[in-house]
Amino acid sequence: MPLQQQAAAAHTDVLIIGAGVSGIGAAYYLQRDQPEKSYIILEAREASGGTWDLFRYPGIRSDSDLHTFGYEFKPWIDSEAIAGADKILDYLRKTAAENGIDSKIHYNHRVLGAAWSSADARWTVEVERSDTGERISMTCNWIFAAAGYYRYDEGFTPEFEGREDFKGDVIHPQHWPEDLDYSGKRVLVIGSGATAVTLVPALARKAAHVTMLQRTPTYVMSLPSRDPLANGLRKLLPATWAYALTRRKNIAISSAVWRFCQKYPKTARRIIRRMNQKALPEGYPVDEHFNPPYNPWDQRLCAVPNGDLFRAISKGKASVVTDHIRSFTPRGVALKSGQELEADIIVTATGLNLLVFGGIKVTVDGKAVDYAEKVAFKGMMLDGVPNLAFAVGYTNSSWTLKIGLLCEHFCRLLAHMDKHGFKSCVPELPDENMETRPLLDFGAGYVKRSIDSLPRQGEGWPWVMSMDYQHDRAVLRKGEVADPHLKFESTVTPVAEAGNQAA
């Protein structure tokens, strides 16, 4: 049966939106823990892999070690612990192929909207074929939104005065031209986050010179691209054992570093500064270019494998300028200090645009859902929205660590509902005037720009967006599924009685 007909006629137990890291992970756990449940994955693009297929800029790689960024169930066996997008993409697609997940992915299917009917206890989902423009409809019992939280069709670029005056190319990393030749060119990278610190050393291999222009410094730490212990353990132990031990070790280290930075920010700042000073040429102005005004882990630390950014600076292939842009000029960028940076190519590594659930319009019994008015429940559902789960990973550690725990808990929730004959469940706020705060306690610019469009979180469990792996491991993997604030309904049992049973 043709793919579009198959999707149009389908009813499935679980509809997964997105075939990236989260979506493939969700599919695996469903197959493992809920093998009787049917599912399909709708992917708006023509290929799987999400971020790792979308971004094509030079040097794109992980900024977390792959022993924790990888799935718990599939060992990362490559010798590089911080790897490029090509290896990550291969790992993801092998995971999908080995588990038959790839056969459940419907490409070029963009979800436009979803309407929940309490009378039917199911979703009706409107889908557009992005390759043909055809509109189709399908139904499902559950939606699992695994589309991440940023827009795939456009990145964020500020309005720069005089941009049209610049005679060279202006490029955003999210839309990197495959045929761009930067050999021997002067490249100016605007930005100081993970994308910028990845791009600069990669571009410096061919470019005449690369300048990173930043408004505010970022914490940058050098990490080895290879994990000697992991590579050594694989020679002595089965891959699954070696991976489990390495993963446990890396989780412990990253958690300890984060906690240390939170508890002793001044000491952490001094340590990072000392490491930067040692990696850079003698007399380099570390405090000007690598000493942020905020504490470590108020924003994500940028990892540079084997200090490649520092090496590019030390070799004179790259430089950092900390200043504010006054305007673009025909030859480059004029700064507020009066300096002009000349360039042949300008790369605006200025961040992302956030987009909740891929921009899907959701209604519940005919009423539109305003995401900004909703509060997250256990970091995976929204109050007042039945049978919809979402996946958002950690911002202070490997994204996938959180995704695995969320997927396990989701499967346990499905099992609980089957056991008691429940058809739907919905989180309900204990108090409509409950104190809330932004969903992500994270100082990144792309979060701050979109904070008013995102759901909220409360001040205590289960209404917090936890960023603590050990806490989540306890409550999501082992804690009770039933909760006084999670109301279940059945076609057999009256609502009040169902709620009492769940509690």
Image: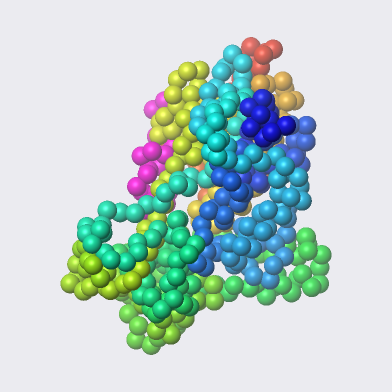
What residue span does the magenta drawing correspond to?
A: 428-455
211 or 128: nearer the eye?
128
Q: Is residue 163 above or below residue 18?
A: below
Secondary structure mainly formed by the magenta segment:
loop
Residue 36 figure quarter: top right
Q: Residue at x 57, y 56 (%)?
A: 52
Residue 470: in sight, yes or no?
A: no
- Quadrant assignment for the C terminus: top right
| 438 magenta-colored | yes
Residue at the image position 59 percent from the left and 13 percent from the top:
119
Q: What is the x, y in percent for residue 174?
A: 45, 56
Residue at the image position 45 percent from the left and 27 percent from the top:
369
Q: Assess whether residue 452 is covered by the magenta stretch.
A: yes
**In the picture provided, is 465 more to the left or to the right than 102?**
left
Q: Report the residue at 35% width, 83% height from top.
A: 284
Residue at the left extreme of this rendering: 338
On the question of residue 30 being in view, the answer is yes
Front one among 40 and 497 = 40
Rendered image coloring scheme: rainbow
In the picture, measured across the screen, residue 279 lies left or right of residue 52, that is: left
The image quadrant of residue 104 is: top right
Residue 392 % position (x, y): 54, 45
Quadrant in the picture for the N terminus = top right
**Could you tell me residue 393's position as x and y percent?**
55, 49
